[in-house]
Image: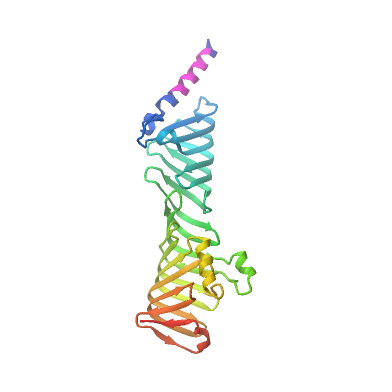
Amino acid sequence: MFKYFKITKLAIRYCLLIGIWPLIFGYSVVSAQDMQPQEELSPQMGNVTDAGQVNDFSLAGYGEKGKKTWDIAGKSADIMTDTVKLNEVTGNLYGKDENVKLKADKGDFNKTDGKLHLEKNVVITTSSGTKLTTNSLDWDRKASNLSTPDLVSIERDNVVTVATGAKGEPGLKRVSLEKDVKLDINPTEAEKAKPDGLKDKITITCDGPLEVDYEKNVAYFQNNVKVVRQELAIYSDRLDVYFFSSKKEEAQVQEASAAPSAFMGGKIDKILARGNVKVMRGENASYSEEAIYTAADKKLILRGKPKLILYSAEDLKDASAGN
Protein backbone atom coordinates (compact mmCIF):
# COMPACT_ATOMS: atom_id res chain seq x y z
CA MET A 1 0.00 0.00 0.00
CA PHE A 2 2.85 2.37 0.92
CA LYS A 3 4.71 1.64 -2.34
CA TYR A 4 1.54 2.19 -4.36
CA PHE A 5 0.93 5.51 -2.63
CA LYS A 6 4.53 6.67 -3.26
CA ILE A 7 4.42 5.77 -6.97
CA THR A 8 1.04 7.44 -7.36
CA LYS A 9 2.31 10.55 -5.62
CA LEU A 10 5.27 10.87 -8.00
CA ALA A 11 3.09 10.18 -11.03
CA ILE A 12 0.60 12.88 -10.02
CA ARG A 13 3.44 15.37 -9.46
CA TYR A 14 4.95 14.59 -12.86
CA CYS A 15 1.58 14.91 -14.61
CA LEU A 16 0.86 18.19 -12.85
CA LEU A 17 4.23 19.57 -13.96
CA ILE A 18 3.54 18.65 -17.57
CA GLY A 19 -0.08 19.69 -17.47
CA ILE A 20 0.35 23.16 -15.99
CA TRP A 21 3.53 24.01 -17.91
CA PRO A 22 1.79 26.01 -20.66
CA LEU A 23 -0.20 27.87 -17.98
CA ILE A 24 2.95 28.75 -16.05
CA PHE A 25 4.63 30.24 -19.11
CA GLY A 26 1.48 31.77 -20.57
CA TYR A 27 1.79 30.25 -24.06
CA SER A 28 -0.79 28.76 -26.38
CA VAL A 29 -0.33 25.30 -27.86
CA VAL A 30 -0.65 25.41 -31.63
CA SER A 31 -1.15 22.75 -34.23
CA ALA A 32 1.25 22.16 -37.12
CA GLN A 33 -1.39 23.49 -39.49
CA ASP A 34 -1.78 26.81 -37.68
CA MET A 35 -0.34 29.55 -39.87
CA GLN A 36 -0.01 32.13 -37.08
CA PRO A 37 3.51 32.26 -35.54
CA GLN A 38 2.98 31.14 -31.94
CA GLU A 39 5.02 29.06 -29.51
CA GLU A 40 4.55 25.72 -27.85
CA LEU A 41 6.76 24.78 -24.92
CA SER A 42 7.78 21.16 -24.66
CA PRO A 43 9.58 20.20 -21.42
CA GLN A 44 11.48 16.91 -21.26
CA MET A 45 12.54 15.67 -17.84
CA GLY A 46 14.53 12.76 -16.48
CA ASN A 47 13.97 11.21 -13.06
CA VAL A 48 11.90 13.45 -10.75
CA THR A 49 12.67 13.17 -7.02
CA ASP A 50 10.42 14.01 -4.07
CA ALA A 51 12.31 17.32 -3.69
CA GLY A 52 11.53 18.33 -7.25
CA GLN A 53 15.04 17.63 -8.53
CA VAL A 54 15.57 16.47 -12.11
CA ASN A 55 18.77 14.80 -13.23
CA ASP A 56 18.35 15.89 -16.85
CA PHE A 57 16.10 18.70 -18.03
CA SER A 58 15.37 20.22 -21.43
CA LEU A 59 12.89 22.75 -22.70
CA ALA A 60 12.06 23.60 -26.31
CA GLY A 61 9.93 26.19 -28.06
CA TYR A 62 8.06 25.56 -31.31
CA GLY A 63 6.76 28.18 -33.68
CA GLU A 64 4.88 28.22 -36.95
CA LYS A 65 4.00 24.78 -38.38
CA GLY A 66 5.62 23.07 -35.41
CA LYS A 67 9.14 24.20 -36.29
CA LYS A 68 11.55 24.27 -33.35
CA THR A 69 12.75 27.82 -32.64
CA TRP A 70 14.91 27.24 -29.55
CA ASP A 71 15.86 24.72 -26.90
CA ILE A 72 17.61 24.70 -23.52
CA ALA A 73 19.08 21.75 -21.64
CA GLY A 74 20.79 21.34 -18.28
CA LYS A 75 21.48 19.04 -15.36
CA SER A 76 20.33 18.99 -11.74
CA ALA A 77 17.40 21.31 -12.32
CA ASP A 78 15.18 22.38 -9.42
CA ILE A 79 11.82 22.81 -11.14
CA MET A 80 9.55 23.27 -8.11
CA THR A 81 10.44 26.95 -7.59
CA ASP A 82 9.56 29.95 -9.77
CA THR A 83 13.07 29.83 -11.21
CA VAL A 84 14.47 26.66 -12.78
CA LYS A 85 18.06 26.17 -11.58
CA LEU A 86 20.34 24.64 -14.21
CA ASN A 87 23.92 23.38 -14.32
CA GLU A 88 25.98 22.64 -17.45
CA VAL A 89 23.60 24.69 -19.55
CA THR A 90 23.45 24.29 -23.32
CA GLY A 91 21.04 25.86 -25.75
CA ASN A 92 20.28 26.56 -29.39
CA LEU A 93 18.44 29.29 -31.26
CA TYR A 94 17.21 28.31 -34.70
CA GLY A 95 16.89 31.34 -36.97
CA LYS A 96 15.85 31.73 -40.56
CA ASP A 97 19.35 32.48 -41.82
CA GLU A 98 21.56 31.60 -38.87
CA ASN A 99 21.71 29.27 -35.87
CA VAL A 100 23.18 30.14 -32.48
CA LYS A 101 24.68 27.86 -29.83
CA LEU A 102 25.12 28.88 -26.21
CA LYS A 103 26.61 27.23 -23.14
CA ALA A 104 27.44 28.16 -19.56
CA ASP A 105 28.32 26.52 -16.25
CA LYS A 106 25.13 27.72 -14.55
CA GLY A 107 21.80 29.22 -15.47
CA ASP A 108 18.43 30.34 -14.12
CA PHE A 109 15.26 30.13 -16.21
CA ASN A 110 12.41 32.31 -14.94
CA LYS A 111 9.03 30.67 -15.43
CA THR A 112 7.11 33.94 -15.13
CA ASP A 113 8.80 36.10 -17.75
CA GLY A 114 10.70 33.43 -19.72
CA LYS A 115 14.08 35.13 -19.20
CA LEU A 116 17.30 33.13 -19.00
CA HIS A 117 20.28 34.22 -16.91
CA LEU A 118 23.62 32.50 -17.56
CA GLU A 119 26.73 32.61 -15.38
CA LYS A 120 30.37 31.49 -15.56
CA ASN A 121 32.19 30.62 -18.78
CA VAL A 122 29.38 31.87 -21.00
CA VAL A 123 30.08 31.20 -24.69
CA ILE A 124 27.87 32.04 -27.66
CA THR A 125 28.77 30.95 -31.19
CA THR A 126 26.92 31.58 -34.44
CA SER A 127 26.89 29.53 -37.62
CA SER A 128 28.48 32.47 -39.47
CA GLY A 129 31.57 32.34 -37.27
CA THR A 130 31.04 34.92 -34.51
CA LYS A 131 32.07 33.93 -30.97
CA LEU A 132 31.13 35.85 -27.82
CA THR A 133 32.56 35.05 -24.38
CA THR A 134 31.68 36.68 -21.05
CA ASN A 135 31.09 35.87 -17.37
CA SER A 136 27.33 36.44 -17.30
CA LEU A 137 24.54 36.95 -19.81
CA ASP A 138 20.81 37.70 -19.77
CA TRP A 139 18.63 36.46 -22.61
CA ASP A 140 15.20 38.08 -22.93
CA ARG A 141 13.48 35.84 -25.43
CA LYS A 142 10.32 37.94 -25.75
CA ALA A 143 12.28 41.14 -26.40
CA SER A 144 14.75 39.17 -28.55
CA ASN A 145 17.92 40.61 -27.03
CA LEU A 146 21.03 39.62 -25.09
CA SER A 147 22.83 41.77 -22.53
CA THR A 148 25.69 41.66 -20.04
CA PRO A 149 27.29 44.28 -17.74
CA ASP A 150 30.55 42.31 -17.62
CA LEU A 151 33.70 42.24 -19.69
CA VAL A 152 32.90 40.75 -23.08
CA SER A 153 35.02 39.49 -25.97
CA ILE A 154 33.73 39.07 -29.53
CA GLU A 155 35.75 37.29 -32.22
CA ARG A 156 34.90 37.21 -35.91
CA ASP A 157 37.41 36.30 -38.62
CA ASN A 158 40.58 38.28 -37.86
CA VAL A 159 38.81 40.92 -35.72
CA VAL A 160 38.76 40.70 -31.90
CA THR A 161 36.74 43.20 -29.86
CA VAL A 162 36.85 43.62 -26.07
CA ALA A 163 34.63 45.95 -24.02
CA THR A 164 32.72 46.30 -20.77
CA GLY A 165 28.98 45.82 -21.13
CA ALA A 166 27.16 44.70 -24.26
CA LYS A 167 23.69 44.46 -25.78
CA GLY A 168 22.67 42.75 -28.98
CA GLU A 169 20.42 40.47 -30.92
CA PRO A 170 20.53 36.72 -30.18
CA GLY A 171 22.14 36.09 -33.58
CA LEU A 172 24.79 38.77 -32.85
CA LYS A 173 24.07 40.48 -36.17
CA ARG A 174 23.93 43.81 -34.35
CA VAL A 175 25.87 44.46 -31.16
CA SER A 176 26.32 47.55 -28.99
CA LEU A 177 29.41 47.61 -26.76
CA GLU A 178 29.02 50.12 -23.97
CA LYS A 179 32.44 51.35 -22.76
CA ASP A 180 36.22 50.87 -22.69
CA VAL A 181 36.22 49.45 -26.21
CA LYS A 182 39.28 47.93 -27.86
CA LEU A 183 39.18 46.39 -31.34
CA ASP A 184 42.17 44.57 -32.85
CA ILE A 185 42.37 43.80 -36.56
CA ASN A 186 45.01 41.11 -36.87
CA PRO A 187 46.83 40.33 -40.12
CA THR A 188 45.63 37.11 -41.71
CA GLU A 189 48.03 34.29 -42.54
CA ALA A 190 47.59 35.12 -46.23
CA GLU A 191 48.60 38.74 -45.61
CA LYS A 192 51.62 37.70 -43.55
CA ALA A 193 52.83 35.49 -46.41
CA LYS A 194 52.81 38.36 -48.92
CA PRO A 195 56.02 40.42 -49.24
CA ASP A 196 54.03 43.67 -49.13
CA GLY A 197 51.14 42.36 -47.05
CA LEU A 198 49.95 43.58 -43.68
CA LYS A 199 52.30 42.40 -40.93
CA ASP A 200 51.13 44.40 -37.93
CA LYS A 201 47.78 44.54 -36.22
CA ILE A 202 45.62 47.65 -36.19
CA THR A 203 44.14 48.71 -32.85
CA ILE A 204 41.10 50.96 -32.46
CA THR A 205 40.02 52.18 -29.03
CA CYS A 206 37.23 54.45 -27.81
CA ASP A 207 35.38 55.35 -24.62
CA GLY A 208 32.21 53.94 -26.15
CA PRO A 209 29.73 53.06 -27.23
CA LEU A 210 30.67 50.99 -30.27
CA GLU A 211 27.83 49.94 -32.57
CA VAL A 212 28.62 46.95 -34.81
CA ASP A 213 26.33 45.85 -37.65
CA TYR A 214 27.64 42.58 -39.07
CA GLU A 215 24.91 42.49 -41.72
CA LYS A 216 26.00 45.85 -43.14
CA ASN A 217 29.69 45.22 -42.30
CA VAL A 218 30.17 48.51 -40.51
CA ALA A 219 31.34 49.59 -37.05
CA TYR A 220 30.60 52.97 -35.44
CA PHE A 221 33.07 54.12 -32.76
CA GLN A 222 32.15 57.05 -30.53
CA ASN A 223 33.96 59.34 -28.08
CA ASN A 224 37.72 59.69 -27.81
CA VAL A 225 38.49 57.40 -30.74
CA LYS A 226 42.08 56.40 -31.51
CA VAL A 227 43.44 54.24 -34.34
CA VAL A 228 47.02 52.98 -34.07
CA ARG A 229 49.25 51.08 -36.47
CA GLN A 230 53.02 51.32 -36.16
CA GLU A 231 53.90 55.04 -36.48
CA LEU A 232 50.45 56.05 -37.69
CA ALA A 233 47.74 57.31 -35.30
CA ILE A 234 44.31 58.83 -35.97
CA TYR A 235 42.33 60.69 -33.30
CA SER A 236 38.70 61.76 -33.68
CA ASP A 237 35.36 62.16 -31.91
CA ARG A 238 33.73 59.54 -34.13
CA LEU A 239 35.00 56.88 -36.49
CA ASP A 240 33.07 54.72 -38.97
CA VAL A 241 34.85 51.61 -40.28
CA TYR A 242 33.42 49.85 -43.35
CA PHE A 243 34.54 46.27 -43.95
CA PHE A 244 34.37 44.31 -47.20
CA SER A 245 31.07 42.45 -47.44
CA SER A 246 32.59 39.48 -49.31
CA LYS A 247 35.92 38.01 -50.39
CA LYS A 248 34.94 38.69 -54.01
CA GLU A 249 34.56 42.38 -53.29
CA GLU A 250 37.88 42.41 -51.45
CA ALA A 251 39.63 40.69 -54.37
CA GLN A 252 38.24 43.24 -56.84
CA VAL A 253 39.72 46.10 -54.84
CA GLN A 254 43.09 44.37 -54.51
CA GLU A 255 43.18 43.74 -58.27
CA ALA A 256 42.53 47.43 -58.90
CA SER A 257 45.43 48.37 -56.63
CA ALA A 258 49.08 47.74 -57.37
CA ALA A 259 49.43 46.10 -53.96
CA PRO A 260 47.32 45.37 -50.90
CA SER A 261 46.66 48.33 -48.64
CA ALA A 262 49.69 49.10 -46.50
CA PHE A 263 47.59 51.36 -44.28
CA MET A 264 44.67 49.28 -43.09
CA GLY A 265 44.98 45.86 -44.67
CA GLY A 266 42.74 43.77 -46.87
CA LYS A 267 39.68 43.53 -44.62
CA ILE A 268 38.81 47.23 -44.40
CA ASP A 269 37.15 49.02 -47.30
CA LYS A 270 36.80 52.58 -45.98
CA ILE A 271 37.35 54.63 -42.82
CA LEU A 272 35.53 57.88 -42.04
CA ALA A 273 36.80 59.96 -39.10
CA ARG A 274 34.73 62.95 -37.95
CA GLY A 275 35.11 65.68 -35.38
CA ASN A 276 38.45 67.12 -34.21
CA VAL A 277 40.39 64.81 -36.49
CA LYS A 278 44.12 64.57 -35.91
CA VAL A 279 46.40 62.31 -37.93
CA MET A 280 49.95 61.63 -36.77
CA ARG A 281 52.52 59.86 -38.92
CA GLY A 282 55.97 60.03 -37.46
CA GLU A 283 56.53 63.69 -36.55
CA ASN A 284 54.07 64.94 -39.15
CA ALA A 285 50.56 65.97 -38.13
CA SER A 286 47.36 67.00 -39.84
CA TYR A 287 44.20 68.57 -38.44
CA SER A 288 40.75 68.65 -40.05
CA GLU A 289 37.04 68.27 -39.42
CA GLU A 290 36.89 65.04 -41.40
CA ALA A 291 39.25 62.43 -42.82
CA ILE A 292 38.41 59.66 -45.28
CA TYR A 293 40.60 56.69 -46.10
CA THR A 294 39.74 54.33 -48.97
CA ALA A 295 41.47 51.00 -49.57
CA ALA A 296 40.89 51.13 -53.34
CA ASP A 297 43.29 54.02 -53.93
CA LYS A 298 45.13 53.98 -50.58
CA LYS A 299 44.53 57.69 -50.05
CA LEU A 300 43.74 59.71 -46.95
CA ILE A 301 41.61 62.75 -47.83
CA LEU A 302 41.27 65.61 -45.34
CA ARG A 303 38.16 67.80 -45.40
CA GLY A 304 37.02 70.81 -43.42
CA LYS A 305 39.77 73.39 -42.91
CA PRO A 306 42.66 70.95 -43.23
CA LYS A 307 45.98 71.99 -41.74
CA LEU A 308 49.27 70.16 -42.25
CA ILE A 309 52.39 70.37 -40.12
CA LEU A 310 55.18 68.64 -42.04
CA TYR A 311 58.62 67.71 -40.82
CA SER A 312 59.15 65.11 -43.57
CA ALA A 313 57.22 65.07 -46.85
CA GLU A 314 58.23 61.43 -47.36
CA ASP A 315 55.97 60.31 -44.50
CA LEU A 316 52.86 61.79 -46.14
CA LYS A 317 53.54 61.01 -49.79
CA ASP A 318 50.32 58.93 -50.05
CA ALA A 319 48.07 61.61 -48.50
CA SER A 320 45.97 64.15 -50.36
CA ALA A 321 43.97 67.14 -49.09
CA GLY A 322 40.52 68.09 -50.36
CA ASN A 323 37.88 70.75 -49.77
Nearest the viewer among 26 and 62 is 62
Vertical comparison of 14 with 296: above or below: above
**Residue 105 highlighted magenta (yes or no):** no
| Residue at 41%, 29% in the rendered image | 21
Q: Nearer the viewer, residue 168 or 9?
A: 168
When asked about the image quadrant of residue 201, the answer is: bottom right
Q: Is residue 5 found inside the magenta-colored segment of the image? A: yes
Question: How many numbered discs, if any?
Answer: 0
Residue 20 shows in this picture: yes
Residue 295 lies, with reference to residue 47, above or below; the image says: below
The residue lying at 50 percent from left, 46 percent from top is 100
Seen in the image, is 1 located left or right of residue 237? Answer: right
Q: Position of residue 123 (x, y in %)?
A: 53, 49
Q: Which quadrant would residue 271 be assigned to in this image?
A: bottom left
In the rendered view, how is the structure colored?
Answer: rainbow
Task: Determine if residue 81 is in view.
Answer: no
Q: What range of the chain is rendered magenta?
A: 4-15
- On the image, the x and y values in percent for residue 245 come to 47, 61
Task: State the residue lying farthest toward the top.
Answer: 1
- Quarter of the image containing the C terminus? bottom left
